[in-house]
Image (cartoon, rainbow, N blue to C red):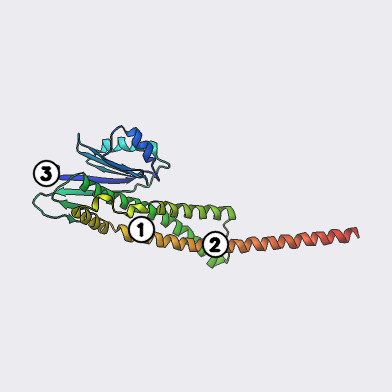
């Protein structure tokens, strides 16, 4: 296989989110296609391709290590929060003009030809896969914290977490879930697949290969479990606060009675 017949794709989770509008305005090159949530560049001088998503993922095609590093430093200027979790995925495109249809494998795809539309579909799915990796990491952390609180309830019959920390935890859970809901569009098929049967099949097979839909549904299910636990924790905290208020009232009444007895 000649090097020219191979295209290396690399997707990296760089940030929680990008300011796509500002990044596009200051990038200095007109994109091949774009929207408020993503931009796709074809850099014909070196046959490089670049796909940037507002959920913090950048996908490179035919970039050298030096070029990739320079680009990462540039896009970090438009990030809300940098992610340091080393989340990335590599994939190969092999071009074989002798075949008649696409062949999808775990770590590469075999195609009869490549054009910007084909590259965009492949890079899109790899970018989605890395984004799901990131949300899986966040959800795992929430599940672990939730399990620790449940174990504490089981062993001690109470929660030691303060009201403020519980509210922070609730905010963290809701923030993760809202981020996923905001990015529901990552499951939508791009418009270019609707009028092209080959692109439609390629997109569908790649989604199956990367388990995009099942992974997304699993994330949503696990976050629902965490939310159910949050309701339980909130109820326990409310009971604790209610009991504390009752004791405060009892103490105040006792003090009032003692004062009345002392002065009469």
Q: Name the residue beneath numbered marker 3.
A: 2
Determine if residue 106 is in view. no
Q: Residue 134's spot in the image, x, y percent?
A: 37, 51
Quadrant showing the C terminus: bottom right
Q: Secondary structure at mark 3?
A: loop
Front residue of this view, candidates 82 and 121: 121
> For numbered disc 1, what is the local secondary structure?
helix
Residue 172: image location, x then y, percent: 48, 52
Residue with the mark numbered 1: 216
Label 1 vs label 3: CA separation?
37 Å
Query: Residue 233 shows which numbered tag?
Result: 2
Q: Earlier in the sequence, mark 1 or mark 2?
A: 1
Circle 3 packing at 10 Å, graded few (<14), some (14-19), many (20+), is few
Q: Residue at x 26, y 38 (%)?
A: 65
Residue depth check, mark 1 versus mark 3: number of the one nearer the observer: 1
Q: CA distance from mark 1 to mark 2?
A: 26 Å
């Amino acid at each position: 296989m000649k090097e020219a017949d191979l295209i290396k794709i690399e997707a990296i989770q760089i940030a929680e989110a990008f300011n796509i509008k500002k990044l596009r305005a200051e990038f200095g090159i007109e994109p091949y296609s774009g929207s408020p949530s993503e931009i796709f560049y074809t850099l014909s001088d070196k046959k490089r391709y670049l796909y940037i998503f507002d959920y913090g993922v950048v996908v490179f095609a035919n970039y050298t290590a030096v070029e990739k590093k320079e680009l990462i430093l540039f896009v970090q200027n438009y990030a809300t929060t940098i992610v340091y979790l080393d989340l990335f995925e590599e994939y190969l495109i092999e071009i074989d003009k002798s075949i008649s249809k696409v062949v999808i494998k775990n770590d590469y795809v075999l195609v009869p030809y490549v054009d910007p539309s084909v590259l965009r579909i492949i890079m899109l799915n790899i970018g989605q896969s890395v984004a799901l990796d990131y949300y899986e990491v966040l959800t795992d952390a929430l599940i672990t914290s939730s399990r620790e609180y449940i174990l504490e309830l089981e062993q001690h019959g109470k929660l030691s977490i303060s009201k403020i920390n519980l509210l922070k935890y609730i905010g963290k859970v809701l923030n993760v879930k809202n981020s996923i809901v905001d990015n529901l569009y990552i499951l939508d098929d791009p418009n270019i697949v609707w009028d092209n049967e080959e692109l439609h099949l390629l997109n569908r097979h790649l989604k199956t290969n990367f388990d995009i839909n099942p992974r997304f549904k699993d994330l949503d299910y696990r976050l629902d479990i965490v939310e159910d636990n949050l309701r339980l924790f909130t109820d326990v905290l409310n009971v604790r606060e209610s009991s504390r208020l009752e004791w405060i009232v009892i103490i105040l009444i006792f003090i009032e009675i003692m004062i009345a007895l002392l002065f009469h």
